[in-house]
Image: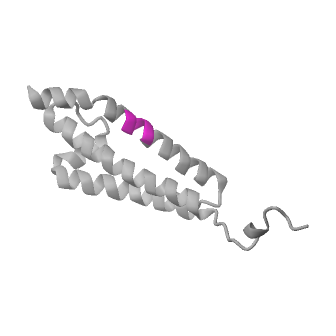
Amino acid sequence: MAHPLHWYSGMHVSAKLPLSLVAAAVLVLNLADALFTLIYIHTGLASEANPLMDAALGGGAVSFMMVKLTLVSLGVLLLFRLRRQRSASIALIGTAVAYSSVFLYHLTEVPSLVAVAGG
């Protein structure tokens, strides 16, 4: 009798796929965070609390975006390259959870943005 999963035995499943999706999610969520941050600052609803990013913001929106996207992308690249080490994988997943939480927070503040835009 054939094993019930005999069709599966010839397939190659890569452990890289899930972490590559996690890494991609961090990059997309970081971009969303940067855009929301610029919008909140422009509308006066927030100020940048991170001193490094506040300094980058002093150079303008393009400078802010370049610094933020570069630093996070380099961090994600490092963690992804070290993904075989458990601590790097955990850090990458933790970063995704943190950015997901920040994104959800941003979504909860959309009504404030709408009120400022409408008023």
- Please tell me whether residue 87 is drawn above or below residue 9 in the rendered image: above
Q: For residue 63: magenta?
A: no
* 36 vs 115, nearest the viewer: 115
Magenta stretch bounds: 100-104
Q: For residue 101: magenta?
A: yes
Mostly what secondary structure, the magenta segment? Answer: helix
Q: Residue at x 25, y 53 (%)?
A: 65
Please identify the residue farthest to the right as the structure is shown: 1
* 82 vs 54, nearest the viewer: 82
- Please tell me whether residue 46 is drawn above or below residue 8 in the rendered image: above
Residue 86: x and y in percent read: 66, 53
Residue 119: x and y in percent read: 8, 25
Q: Is residue 112 visible?
A: yes
Q: Residue at x 59, y 54 (%)?
A: 88
Name the quadrant containing residue 38: top left
* 57 vs 14, nearest the viewer: 14
- Please tell me whether residue 34 is drawn above or below residue 40 in the rendered image: below
Residue 28: x and y in percent read: 37, 53
Residue 85: x and y in percent read: 65, 57
- Please tell me whether residue 27 is drawn above or below residue 113 in the rendered image: below
Q: Quadrant of the N terminus?
A: bottom right
